[in-house]
Image: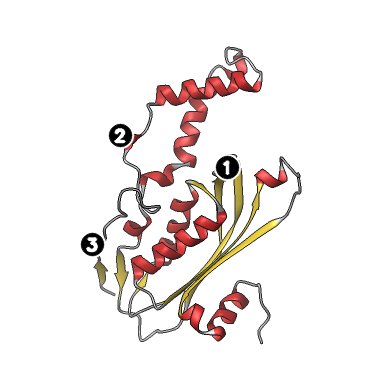
Amino acid sequence: MDAIVKKLTPGKPGSSLAAVPPANRPTREQAEAAVETLIRWAGDDPDREGLRDTPKRVARAYRELFSGYEDCPLDVLSTTFEEVGGYDDLVMLRDIEFTSHCEHHMVPIIGKAHIAYMPNGRVVGISKIARVVDILARRLQTQETMTAEIANAIEEGLDTKGVAVMMEAEHFCMSMRGVSKKGVMTITTQLRGCFQEDERLERRFLNFAGQCPVA
């Protein structure tokens, strides 16, 4: 199977898919100072033993939790394969686990993504689809935006006949604060191309995602 590497423009500056240049970020020392301020705002003493190294730990954790800003999902999809033995049906990954953070309160969003695409003569390694989810999840997000961004990346990066994305997640900004309703799952979808035009394909996708019985 011969791989083709496509040269893709990795998102225009300001695009929701683009990586963020390191030069646009505060220093680590500034980040640590901000965490210390938040500790004081919460009502605690950042100089006590248990919190003395917390600003450093939080800064390191944030670099990991929000590492998606350092990558562009289109780069991940740049290597595709055309030797597929005549396969011309949908490709689907179900139950891709992800953890993101709400852009409104910066608390976790935890859930699963179900993604399908209809190849247009070429396919991509299946792990790359999961990697796209991981990159976009490791940014401040709303579930609606992330659902659309995943569809945009796959549609643009693979030039597919169609893309379908469903995400189901629990938002901790709802379960641990505010109305405090635990276990509520939010479901969002995006259907593009043939999945939007063909009701049978839509139903197959929903069935595979476990959201619709076979007609």
Q: Report the residue at 34% width, 72% height from top.
A: 159
User: Considering only vertical position in the picture, is 34 above or below 201?
Assistant: above
User: Considering only vertical position in the picture, is 176 above or below 74?
Assistant: above
Q: Earlier in the sequence, mark 3 or mark 1?
A: 3
Kind of residue sitting beneath label 3: Lys
Q: How crowded is the residue under tag 2: few (<14 C-alpha within 10 Å), some, or many (20+)?
A: few
Q: Report the residue at 55% width, 57% height from top.
A: 144
* Residue matched to label 2: 23
Q: How crowded is the residue under tag 1: few (<14 C-alpha within 10 Å), some, or many (20+)?
A: few
Locate residue 187, reporting x and y percent: 63, 62
Q: Using the rendered view, name the quadrant where residue 8 is placed.
A: bottom left
* Residue matched to label 3: 7
Q: The residue tagged with tag 2: helix, strand or loop? A: helix
Locate residue 13, reporting x and y percent: 31, 48
Q: The residue tagged with tag 3: helix, strand or loop? A: loop
Locate residue 185, reporting x and y percent: 68, 57
Q: Earlier in the sequence, mark 2 or mark 1?
A: 2
Q: Earlier in the sequence, mark 2 or mark 3?
A: 3
Q: Quadrant of the N terminus?
A: bottom left
- Residue 49: numbered disc: none
